[in-house]
Amino acid sequence: MTTRTIALISPVLFFLTGGFQVLAQDVSVRPDATIIQQHINILAADKMKGRGTGSKGLKKAARYIERQYRKYGLSPAGTRKYKQPFIARVRKVTVKDSLRKANNIIGLLDNRAPYTIVIGAHYDHLGTGQQGSSKHPEPEGHIHNGADDNASGVAGLLELARYFSGNGETEPYNFLFIAFSAEELGLLGSKYFVEHSVLPVENIHFMLNMDMIGRYDPQRGIGIGGYGTSSDWPSVFEDVQAGVKFFTDDAGSGGSDHGSFYAKQVPVLFFHTGGHPDYHMPSDDADKINAEAEAKIIDLEIQIIENAMKKEKLPFTEVKG
């Protein structure tokens, strides 16, 4: 069993060497709608059987994510290569088959920096209706493909990994990319991670979470939660040029994996395109994804991340109310 160790370098050194200058952008690795759609088509295919926690389909999805991590040159950062194993409880009461083996899938882009940005998205869904909270009146036996929830977020995770590993820059922060398991059972993967983190939680610059970013509605726009979790977020957002409409919300807690980090006093951002009639239904399929809009959302995230990397480690602010 091994644990990745992230090297520490003085923040002063980064400032003296110009480490916090504006980063160049490589057009060749900008978010690509075709690649996004390909990821979602694979992760939300019927053969994945809804990616239920502990299922063969979720294991297939984990192997796919690991292959992409290797392709983008991310170092294994789990306790078993890319995997961080844990046991997920499927039901509130322990009965036969209620405990499932689960794995967070963790890859590191190590820039030998003192602090780390965590990028997260959950890759599990509701399987064939026996776990989680399906909205179907008779869910069992129906494959819940979870294209928006949350193959879309995983596609965003992988596109950010592709960009930051391939843009030709050595960034002033490390990146830890985490595909969380068992989110649908109560944020179990992210809760396990923050209690058994592979790096000191206090060394996290901020956590960015993507959950359901594939069904952009131009009337609503993309919601960005967590705006109130650091006093620096307003200045980070000042100069972003968005190709999509967006709005912010202060709340740092909520029903997705960023909430586990907020509970540990880590500044967070949460990207979400909103609910729709296919939410937690067997009809949440890949052909309903707006990949072009998702590419613009990810481009917005890149701008925000790059602005945040011009700053020292973000201070945490508790959101009142």
Image (cartoon, helix red, strand yellow):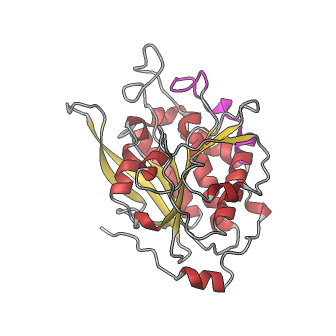
What is the residue that sits farthest to the left in this orientation?
Answer: 95
What is the residue that sits farthest to the front in this orientation?
Answer: 320
Tell me, yes or no, whether the highlighted magenta stretch contains residue 196. no
In the image, residue 155 lies at what x, y percent? 60, 47
Query: Can you say whether 22 is above or below 44 in the image?
Result: below
Q: Is residue 302 visible?
A: no
Q: Is residue 260 visible?
A: yes
Query: Can you say whether 83 is above or below 88 in the image?
Result: below
From the viewer's perspective, tell me whether residue 314 is left or right of residue 237: left
Q: Quadrant of residue 248?
A: top right
Residues shaded magenta: 276-295
From the viewer's perspective, tell me whether residue 274 is left or right of residue 187: right
Residue under the point 54% across and 39% down? 150
- Magenta span: chief secondary structure: loop
In the image, residue 101 lies at what x, y percent? 30, 45
From the viewer's perspective, tell me whether residue 146 is left or right of residue 292: left
User: In this orientation, which residue lies closer to the viewer: 173 or 126?
Assistant: 173
Residue under the point 44% across and 31% down? 126
User: In this orientation, which residue lies closer to the viewer: 313 or 136?
Assistant: 313
